[in-house]
């Protein structure tokens, strides 16, 4: 949990800097746009409002993102998800034109899903479920919800990486989520992402540690998955035979 908050705080700082830079750049370019428009009017050319509308959508998306960052810092993850989703919706058909910014919206939303998954309690509260009555059902629901959130992390990070292939935070979050899913295929994908991180930045200590730690864990999980699969097949066979 602490690790993700630290990562996100860095990202908030980075995105805040980027946003400030973007605004500054827009402000410096604005007079040029006004001059060009006036010149075009003098020449009788038609004014195309599309660019202004797109820029307006982008600025609204940035506002939603900044609100999401603030909510995340307050651990209001569900509300932050709503804000990042608004940013994503606003830019839906123009992702490629603002690839880095849009990749941040997806990666920040992934951070929320990951934080929720990491805060999911591992054990059933005995005060709520005395003598474990209904506890197993609640545990199953909780595990399913956690799995769903981790899969959403993978999905959002994958989209972020489509827009920005060297986005290290997206790679790290996707690797973390796949590792937490703790399935053979997911662990293998996590290892691939950690290897990719080292190609981008060989100084990443966490990625180096995971590259050494995961291979034996993957083999163990592969055997567990096989045993589970054989157990299910055996159970199906027994039910058919009666």
Image: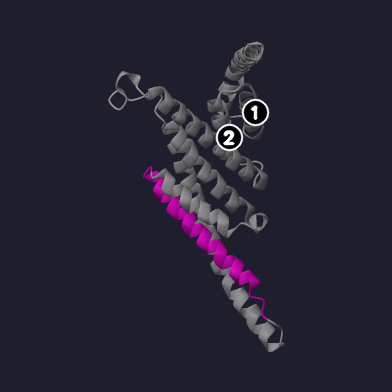
In the image: residue 131, left or right of residue 178: left
Position of 29 relative to 118 (above/below)? below
Q: Residues within 10 Å of mark 1 (few under 14, many from 20)?
A: some
Position of 202 relative to 44 (above/below)? above
- Residue 225's quadrant in the figure? top right
Name the residue beneath numbered marker 2: 174
Position of 15 relative to 112 (above/below)? below
Q: Magenta stretch: give its range.
A: 47-75
Q: Position of residue 179 (x, y in %)?
A: 56, 26
Predominant secondary structure in magenta? Answer: helix
Q: Residues within 10 Å of mark 2 (few under 14, many from 20)?
A: many
Q: Position of residue 187 (x, y in %)?
A: 61, 24
Q: Nearer the viewer, residue 191 or 124?
A: 124
Quadrant housing the N terminus? top left
Q: Nearer the viewer, residue 178 or 16?
A: 178
Residues at circles 1 and 2 in contact by the CB criterion of under 8 Å: yes
In the image: residue 3, left or right of residue 106: left
Q: How is the image coloured?
A: one colour
In the image: residue 132, left or right of residue 141: left
Q: Identify the mark nearer the N-term, 1 or 2.
A: 2
Q: Position of residue 153 (x, y in %)?
A: 55, 38
User: Could you tell me which secondary element the residue under label 1 belongs to?
Assistant: helix
User: Could you tell me which secondary element the residue under label 2 belongs to?
Assistant: helix
């Amino acid at each position: 949990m602490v690790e993700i908050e630290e990562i996100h705080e860095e990202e908030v700082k980075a995105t805040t800097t980027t946003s400030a830079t973007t605004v500054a750049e827009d402000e410096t370019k604005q007079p040029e746009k006004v001059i060009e428009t006036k010149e075009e009017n003098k020449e009788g050319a038609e004014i195309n409002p599309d660019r202004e509308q797109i820029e307006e959508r982008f600025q609204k998306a940035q506002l939603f993102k900044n609100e999401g960052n603030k909510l995340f810092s307050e651990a209001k993850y569900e509300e932050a998800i709503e804000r990042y989703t608004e940013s994503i919706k606003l830019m839906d058909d123009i992702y490629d034109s603002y690839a880095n910014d849009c990749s941040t919206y997806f990666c920040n939303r992934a951070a929320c899903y990951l934080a929720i998954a990491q805060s999911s309690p591992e054990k059933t509260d005995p005060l709520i479920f005395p003598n474990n009555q209904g506890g197993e059902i609640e545990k199953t629901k909780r595990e399913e919800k956690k799995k769903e959130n981790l899969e959403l992390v993978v999905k959002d990070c994958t989209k972020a990486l489509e827009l920005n292939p060297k986005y290290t935070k997206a790679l790290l979050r996707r690797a973390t989520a796949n590792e937490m899913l703790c399935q053979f295929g997911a662990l293998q994908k996590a290892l691939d992402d950690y290897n990719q991180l080292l190609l981008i930045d060989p100084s990443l200590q966490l990625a180096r540690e995971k590259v050494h730690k995961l291979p034996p864990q993957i083999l163990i999980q592969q055997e567990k998955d096989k045993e589970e699969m054989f157990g299910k097949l055996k159970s199906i066979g027994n039910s058919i035979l009666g």
